[in-house]
Amino acid sequence: MKFFSDNAAPVHPRIWAAMQAADVADTAYDGDALSARLDDAFSELFGAPCAAIWVATGTAGNCLALSAMVPPHGGVVCHREAHIEMDEGGAPGFFLHGAKLLLADGDGAKLTPDTIRAVVDAIRPGVHQVQPHAISITQATECGRVYTAQEVGAIGALAKERGLGLHMDGARFANAIAHLGCAPAEVTVRAGVDALTFGCVKNGGMSAEAIVFFAPDLVDVVRYRRKRAGHLQSKGRYLAAQVLAMLDGDLWLDNARAANAAAQEIAAACGDRLIHPVEANELFVILSPAEAAALRAQGFDFYDWNAPIGAPGAARLVTSWCSPAQEVEALARAIAAL
Amino acid sequence: MKFFSDNAAPVHPRIWAAMQAADVADTAYDGDALSARLDDAFSELFGAPCAAIWVATGTAGNCLALSAMVPPHGGVVCHREAHIEMDEGGAPGFFLHGAKLLLADGDGAKLTPDTIRAVVDAIRPGVHQVQPHAISITQATECGRVYTAQEVGAIGALAKERGLGLHMDGARFANAIAHLGCAPAEVTVRAGVDALTFGCVKNGGMSAEAIVFFAPDLVDVVRYRRKRAGHLQSKGRYLAAQVLAMLDGDLWLDNARAANAAAQEIAAACGDRLIHPVEANELFVILSPAEAAALRAQGFDFYDWNAPIGAPGAARLVTSWCSPAQEVEALARAIAAL
Amino acid sequence: MKFFSDNAAPVHPRIWAAMQAADVADTAYDGDALSARLDDAFSELFGAPCAAIWVATGTAGNCLALSAMVPPHGGVVCHREAHIEMDEGGAPGFFLHGAKLLLADGDGAKLTPDTIRAVVDAIRPGVHQVQPHAISITQATECGRVYTAQEVGAIGALAKERGLGLHMDGARFANAIAHLGCAPAEVTVRAGVDALTFGCVKNGGMSAEAIVFFAPDLVDVVRYRRKRAGHLQSKGRYLAAQVLAMLDGDLWLDNARAANAAAQEIAAACGDRLIHPVEANELFVILSPAEAAALRAQGFDFYDWNAPIGAPGAARLVTSWCSPAQEVEALARAIAAL
Amino acid sequence: MKFFSDNAAPVHPRIWAAMQAADVADTAYDGDALSARLDDAFSELFGAPCAAIWVATGTAGNCLALSAMVPPHGGVVCHREAHIEMDEGGAPGFFLHGAKLLLADGDGAKLTPDTIRAVVDAIRPGVHQVQPHAISITQATECGRVYTAQEVGAIGALAKERGLGLHMDGARFANAIAHLGCAPAEVTVRAGVDALTFGCVKNGGMSAEAIVFFAPDLVDVVRYRRKRAGHLQSKGRYLAAQVLAMLDGDLWLDNARAANAAAQEIAAACGDRLIHPVEANELFVILSPAEAAALRAQGFDFYDWNAPIGAPGAARLVTSWCSPAQEVEALARAIAAL
């Protein structure tokens, strides 16, 4: 019973179907009919002109998006727990040619205007220190927290005031929107976001994410950067098909709602064990080594995680679009019984 | 009737089947059971210890392989028609951090020890000129030519003598082996090749190539570089499945033989129009603009190509694992009738 | 008797004097009073608003200038004999983060609109090939040839038409202007040049060159890049002093005239041996190995050089601001006597 | 009366004399007789085989030294106050092609084995996080503190145990050795240091630092990287002359002793105002805004600095090899009188 990552989940049947429908000879790279539909599909979703391209991984998506905003001598403000800082193997340093991540604080891996200002205002102007050129936030965050439209808007206003780009790592954007119940535009284009990495893989996709530019001009340079990074697949239609299928009939939201509901069911059994409020599909739970072992002995698979200071231990539990109801229920019961 | 690229062909049913068989939850990234089988599968194929990893594109495969051999201040000798020089959007400059491609000549886009020496010996030792660290050859070449075991061996011997790594871009390696009818080891590990980009996508795959290291230590750094380039997909099992299925029962050779046979059938109709001997699945054909238009009017789709000096025009025709017999026959007939 | 490089010459007394006059405590880096005068000094020289900064080497100057014009995924059209291609150890690849040099032809290492167009027009638009973003020319060229105002203007017009930046490597700009006898602006700002590497070291300086931007905005990013490249010296006033002294009373032109005159004196003795017309302070001379040995036996020091096809051998002879009259005369006599 | 930086001080007369003695034509770049003497000069100083090259700035020295130890996908452990992190404009990201600085703590900007382990042990092995390849420490530190031989040795032992390179930024190495009174080898080669940036500019030089490799093989790649970074000056003999003059007759130590003595004289007047013990030539002093203004009104020039939490304000005072005795005395008196 796997709760270690939504990355491990299989591919949704409608994604399979869409890929198979794309299995005809078509123009290579992104010259095919499906890739050509991405701009419109996202423009409709967000109610604003968008330029969108597919890419295979969230890491590539985040870094390519940022490459449109940050020169090699610049910096990106992000949370010190951000995926780009902690889990991408130095990819921002590669894609941005040595640009610097400028690390800020914030509860639940959420930046705030105050924590951003604390970083930015401490930087001396001039050439001796790396100057910020963009802010990157993660929605939902690495702690499973969700930014409200107001919170993103406040960061967007600060970004605008300081002349910084604003990128959103949306590896679990679907889970965030499912939680918020708002229009996707409210936490993105209307809140000042310039580029969004729109995650699909964790949410039932196989190998396609989208980068969505609300400042559509930014896509031009990213097309070159994508090819240059070896990310322009020659049979791109299979990636476009995945992304379009995800949007079609709001599959992305349905999948995320399922994952979130499973997380809530487990959360209800966790009580004081919860380190962060559960807003998406990740739970961070205080578990002693003995308790973790007991759960694992019952067949539950999950990662240990950094425990808060003073706590004996912690674990991360992740649900997915297809976490089996009986496994979820079993886990909730097992935790309650600890 | 599409003869413009093998990239445009659909995915082979056995590749689909293997991907669907992989559609169960498993460990993310390349921690899954299928990815773990790659080393053995290629070691068996080549009869020598290999380390092998998947990657989504040939561009990434070529550049990651070279990144294990060439420091940022070094150079790679390649043909001036090489894919890495002409068609990868500057990816070698990105992956190799500004290392230089050192361009050599050779008929049919084939390097020879002499043309390599002409480049290497003209470089003054010392820090004022970029020094070579590796050689990259393409098998089959960008002109559809195939290196014999002896030819690769002579280049391998030169590489060894000069302390250079030897990389083979095998985007159409299958077509080359199908043509040669030799053991794959003969033109690679036994001929001095250190790393091979083993192409699958043009040969019936969807989104997976393999990098095969005959100097297995080289893979260690490339694992880091792959992640850092955003090429470590989280659901890597679907890529591993494609590669394994390609090797299984020699599907890779069957597909290549089909493509090569189709090319031969068309070649037989081309006579003096052929610019290069047809050894793989690409034909470079002298066609006047009127002749090209006539073929297109009959529904044949292909790219114009650089014509030899003095020729009125030229075209590239590419067959694939699934070029329909009647379309191939029709094209042969149409050319013969020009 | 050294004729192998103007790099080997000592430092002019007025440069020494200026450096010593700068030997007082002042603000570090480029916050000093002398550095602050560079913009005005060059604006006056060129009769147009300039931004100018010092840098220690021509390599750094050329590459930093280009870094303001060329993104990492872009390319620079230059002659295949250009210093940035042949003699800078891959520095453009480093400073430009892997951008590509696009090599063009031309007699005497001079580009022409036609040879530039031949390169640029052969590049397919789109992401598969590196697109040009700038042109770099060398004044005087690596063959000692000088572009006229008309020639630069034609290239400048092409650059403008194609949306490309235009950089001039002026390692021997002084020699070129001394030859042309025109206003420096005529072959630069009025001819469409955006940035000039203004050489001083070969012309009697010690360790300072200037980058002059005729599009003054470009300097902003280069200030960051200079620091980031470790080229912002903390005692920058000694570099500024050199550059200002070079401009003061037209020392730069006096020195260049002296070097050019010495070259002409030798040239007059060379007759048919000259491979290129002598327009600056470099001579490329056909010499058989025996002749070269004979000159060396008389104490003349110089480099062998690539001979034209069919010629038995060649040499490069370089004069400097301080080539002793009797050594110059002796060399001329010795060549005449061969 | 300038106490804001030792960078602002003039050049020592013996450095001038050495540069002028080098003012003859010689082979360009580092082919001259003086550059050739650097290896021996440093080997003698450190009593061990050294390879040494000149470079114009400490930033270039630090980053080039690290480039021999750290691949683009690797990391460098350094203090979060380190010059390479705080004051080099992102140069490590440039020279190391995006490698990451891994920030550790420690009083007085000094790393300890414990603070290094805290960083290194928190990094998950594998490709998802950047792995450390080297440690960089500053001697004297950015807070004017000095590592003892024992302290460096403990770090050196840890570096060896973990397979990490050890670099020492010795911008104020002379001041540290003057303070310690030990053989230079004791805190470097015998303590496990692989490469030292040996500072001269702050200590009476003009434009030359040295990189000293105690693992002499490391210099080979750095020679290429230096050229590639535009740091191979064509008249390198003027840099070599500075470095050799600095070593000659222990000028480097005499100058540092003078600066340190001046710092001690001021320190004696500072009492509880001192934030860090004064061990080199920098003082960090608690000063209220009114007190700082009062000193400035008396003609003392210095930078404000980050004050400790709770303190009303702070300043940095730096002495140099030539701080005038009466100005030092005046400053001490003025502080005592506050």
Image (cartoon, coloured by chain):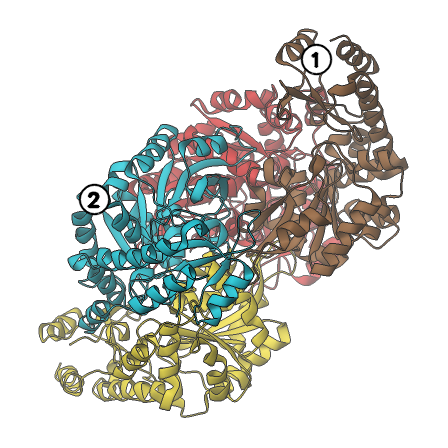
Chain colours: A red, B brown, C cyan, D yellow
B249 or A92: nearer the viewer: B249
Residue B215 horizontal/vertical position (percent): 76, 57
Whether residue A126 is visible here, answered yes or no, is: no
- Is D271 on the left or on the right of C8, as rendered? left
Instruction: Give me the chain letter of mark 1.
Output: B
Instruction: Give me the chain letter of mark 2.
Output: C
Q: Amino acid at mark 2?
A: Ala
Task: Check disc 1: other Cα within 10 Å, few if <14, some if 14-19, many if 20+.
Answer: many
Looking at the rendered structure, whether the residues under marks 1 and 2 are on a common chain is answered as no
The N terminus of chain D, quarter of image: bottom left
> Label 2, on which residue?
C183
Task: Check disc 2: other Cα within 10 Å, few if <14, some if 14-19, many if 20+.
Answer: some
Residue C212 horizontal/vertical position (percent): 28, 49
> Label 1, on which residue?
B300
Residue C256 horizontal/vertical position (percent): 27, 57
Residue A61 horizontal/vertical position (percent): 54, 39
B321 or B22: nearer the viewer: B321
State how far apart marks 1 and 2 are (Cα): 60 Å
Whether residue C155 is visible here, answered yes or no, is: yes
Q: Amino acid at mark 1?
A: Phe
